[in-house]
Amino acid sequence: MGVNQTMKTTTHILICCLLPFGALAAETINAKNWQSHPEVLKIRSLYNEINAAEKAGEFKKDSRKCVLYGGSFEIDGTLYKDSKGKVRKYVVDAGSGDSVGRAEYYYDTNGIPRFTYRTRGAYNGTKKEDRIYFDEKGKHLYTSHKQEGPGYAGSDLEDSVENPSTDYAGLCKG
């Protein structure tokens, strides 16, 4: 076998081995494949990396608590910034006498929203959980939604916050 034939064979083997992964990456994310889809797995890796850095104390943390509407509504916000001052995680907790909600927003090193984990609950026993995934440009990829209970949702928290610093600065304005 000549050098050219060996290179062609090697190239064909590489293409055949990589084709299934590339095909899956190009496949639309849906209810059947979202947990194992390569794009979601990349975002999960980013999620794990950010939470590990938070636990290791690698982020600067800014927090504020606001009581609004005569004390009937509370909202807490926490920004987690890396050593370069980029927000990597933004957490908002909100609640009233009959409902609560929490949203954790995750950002890549470029400040692009990549993932939101949101939970909401209400006094009547309703529980909602959303996992919202975004691509490298911040475009929505997929939402996994679970709900238990009769249906009253609780706090309305955004799917995504493009500018967490601005949102954080305006939390107490109601």
Image: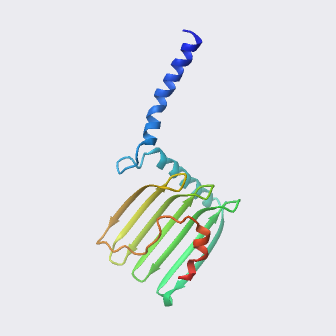
Q: Of residues 98 and 12, which is closer to you in this image?
A: 12
What residue do we see at 60% from left, 77% from top? Answer: 64
Q: Position of residue 21 (x, y in %)?
A: 46, 36
Q: Position of residue 111 (x, y in %)?
A: 61, 59
Number of numbered callouts drawn: 0
Could you say which quadrant of the image residue 166 lies in? bottom right
What residue do we see at 58% from left, 53% from top? Answer: 49
The correct choice, above or below, for 163 with respect to 50 in the image is: below
Q: Position of residue 43 (x, y in %)?
A: 51, 51
The correct choice, above or below, for 166 with respect to 47 in the image is: below
| Colour pattern of the rendering | rainbow
Residue 135 lies left or right of residue 122; in this view the side is right
Q: Of residues 143 and 26, which is closer to you in this image?
A: 26
What residue do we see at 45% from left, 65% from top? Answer: 118
Could you say which quadrant of the image residue 77 lies in? bottom right
Please state, as top left, top right, bottom left or bottom right, where the N terminus lies in the image. Answer: top right
Q: Position of residue 48 (x, y in %)?
A: 55, 54
The correct choice, above or below, for 69 with respect to 108 in the image is: below
